[in-house]
Image (cartoon, rainbow, N blue to C red):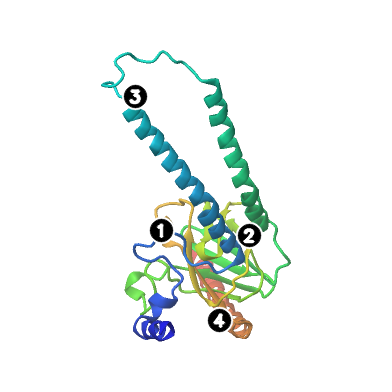
Amino acid sequence: MLKKFAYTLFLLFPGSVLANQPKDWQLGFQKSASESMDDIVWFHDYMLLPVITAITVFVLFLIAYACIRFRASKNKEASTTSHNTFIEVIWTLVPCLILIVLAVPSFKVLYSQDEIPKADVTIKAIGYQWYWGYEYPDENIIFDSYMIEEKDLKEGQPRLLSVDNEVYVPVNKVVKVMITANDVLHAWALPSFGVKRDAVPGRINETWFKADRVGTFYGQCSELCGIKHAFMPITVNVVSQEEYNQWLERAKVEFAKEEINNNIKLAKQIKEIN
């Protein structure tokens, strides 16, 4: 029954079922597509939320108790108590213990993100005002990725997230991303992969992910970088190894032609100036 229902949804709304992007009225994270994001979701759902909920309920109880127990109508004369050593020790030790309990798994998550395994694919992402440039150093592929304007969107392409040239990576392969910027601070972020790194001019930051399923995944610049900060999205297509190899062959031809045309245009402009 569930399979039939899912299939019906796919026929009626294929984009909404398979899209890896924010949803209207969504609560929580986007669906995870990597082990790193699985760890982040687990830490949030099973460590942070219970602790936050318990603290909130406890503080609310203390406020309600104090308001009722020590209200003016029941305490004609104010207490002269200035401190309580036992309570002060408790409210110092308990937060310390909570922080220690949270620190251990959080360090594990941070270490797994910073320790980059041997990469199968290496990509360089360069932030510009206001678009992303990409390089595949091992394949000698270079291209720019601009947001598609709303008037040019095709059916199924999300507004403010679709780009003209998408990044392609193979599924179940370690992808290392070298991130930098050409002008101001940017940030390369993909929520489904649990990836977010600042792009700093003159410096290269590194991150990695290993997508565990195929699909199209969306992200955005997450560092306030100017007037068009909201208009430099990231689109990553995760495909099979065979499809990735086919894309590499097409990309080498397509972007090589673009580079030649750009060089010709640049030469003409220089000639006109001279």
Residue of label 2: 207
For the residues labelled 2 and 3, say whether their Cβ atoms are less than 8 Å apart. Answer: no
Say which quarter of the image contains residue 148.
bottom left
Depth check: give the residue in front, 172 or 155.
172
Closest to the camera, between mark 3 and mark 1, is 3
Could you tell which of marks 2 and 3 lies nearer the N-terminus?
Answer: 3
At label 3, the amino acid type is Phe
User: What x and y, as percent, mark residue 168?
Assistant: 57, 75
Residue of label 3: 70
Could you tell which of marks 1 and 4 lies nearer the N-terminus?
Answer: 1
In the rendered image, the vertical position of residue 227 relative to residue 56, given as above or below: below
Residue of label 1: 230
User: What x and y, as percent, mark residue 220?
Assistant: 47, 61
Mark 2 to mark 3 CA distance (whole Å) = 54 Å
Closest to the camera, between mark 4 and mark 2, is 2
User: What x and y, as percent, mark residue 172?
Assistant: 64, 75
Could you tell which of marks 3 and 1 lies nearer the N-terminus?
Answer: 3
Residue of label 4: 254
Could you tell which of marks 4 and 2 lies nearer the N-terminus?
Answer: 2
User: What x and y, as percent, mark residue 23?
Assistant: 38, 66
Closest to the camera, between mark 1 and mark 4, is 1
